[in-house]
Image: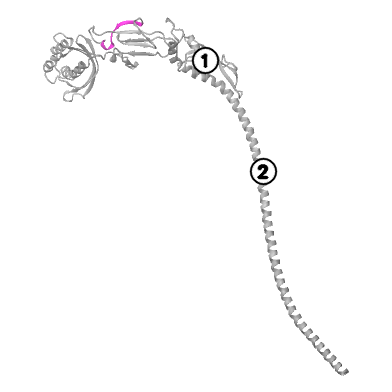
Amino acid sequence: MTESVWRKGLRLFILSLLLLLWGILVWLLLSGSLYRTAIRVLEAGNADQKRRIAAYTAAELQKDGELAALRAASAEQDLQIEALGQASQEKEQEIASLSAQSQTRSEQLLALRIRLSAASAPLDYQEALRQRPPEAALRALVIPASPEPGEAEKRAMLSPLLATAYLEADGENSREDLPSFRIRSAQGQLLGSVSFASSGTDEDGVPVWTVAGEQFDFSGCFRTASLLLPPDYRVTLGERTLGPEWIREEGIGYASFAAASEDFNGLPGLVRYETPPFLGEPALRFYNEQGRELSPEDLREEVFLDRCPGGVRAQIEDFLPGFLDLYVHFSADIRDSAYYYYSRLSPMVLQPDSPLFLRMRAAFEGFGFSGARGAELQSVTLHYVTDLGGGRYAANLNYVTLITGHSGAYPPVEDDLHILLILRQTDDGQLLAEALYFL
């Protein structure tokens, strides 16, 4: 019984020992696998740690780069801020300089305005004077030997004189606070004086100048004009028509008829007007016998004497070329028989005792034939025709002839002759030459 128990215990011991060994073997096996697993786990963890460390390191490096970039940007901004501060300081200095300059210029401008205000006063006065005569000028206007004109007539008389008046500084009578100027006409004649004084200042402190005093004296400015006009012409001076009381002489002859040896009783003589005293350029206007206004350039005998009915003038214009052609040949061209031209010209001349016919007959009867020259009529220019009354007319004209020498005795020469031809119209309307005068 004891052996059986011992054996059982031995078997149990051996079994336990085997289990222990198995357990050790299993433990050893398990321990190696775990170790390798642990090693792998550790290696995987280590690789992950390395990756994390690398990522962290890269992130730190990136942060360091960003930080460096930020520090560089901050440094650049600091430089920009410093530059802006310096520029701002320079601008402030420039603004201060400009402000000082502006202040200086404002002061200079004010000083200039003050000087200009004193200079502009006479200029403004001069312009106003030219536009409208002042009351002081109207009061000073006294016309010699004439009734006192009204204000409108005075203005009309003074306006042409003052329209070109000007002011010049009067150094002798001027003061800084009371500048004085002389008033002169365009021709330099003294008309008066004016002075200015400051009546205060405007809101900017610029003096305001006004007229302190003005005086006018027109006594040395008056003059008269002498006019030669036909008696049926009308002349006005300003608003006044000059009547017979201003005619100083009548029956004055025309210079165009001075060469004539006869009296032209049918032609009214000229009359001489002497105008009332006037100022400056006279406001004269002229009207012919038909009431048409004439310019001063038309006041010449050629216009005065151009009085002839249109139909008669046209008849005279037709008469002249043929008459003058025969007259030129008769008086200068002797290549043909003198009697030929005399006989053809005579029917165009008033007979038997007109001045022209008597002269032609005397010339024909006293001809001496030299045969030295000839003449041809080139042109006729009629200036005017005057109706002398009683069917008589005076034609003022020029005619040009070409004088030639026979057989080339001398070169051709043009001769321009100015004549006054007196014509008479017969009862049947025929025109005949009565007299011819060289002017």
How far across and down, in percent of the image, does residue 70 sit? 67, 54
Dot 1 amino acid type: Arg
Q: Residue at x 70, y 67 (%)?
A: 52
329 relative position to 269: left or right: left
> From what the image shows, is residue 355 above or below residue 15?
above
Is the image coloured rainbow, by chain, by secondary structure, or in one colour? one colour
Residue 405 placement: quadrant: top left
Residue 163 x %, y %? 45, 17
Q: Report the residue marked by disc 1.
A: 182
Q: Which residue is mark 2?
A: 86
Q: CA distance from mark 2 to mark 1?
A: 62 Å
Which residue is rendered at x = 61% and y = 29% of the image?
A: 106
Of residues 178 and 420, the one drawn nearer to the viewer in this rendering:
178
Residue stretch rendered in magenta on the structure: 246-257
Image point (69%, 66%), residue name: 54
Q: Quadrant of residue 305?
A: top left
Q: Name the outermost residue toward the front.
A: 1
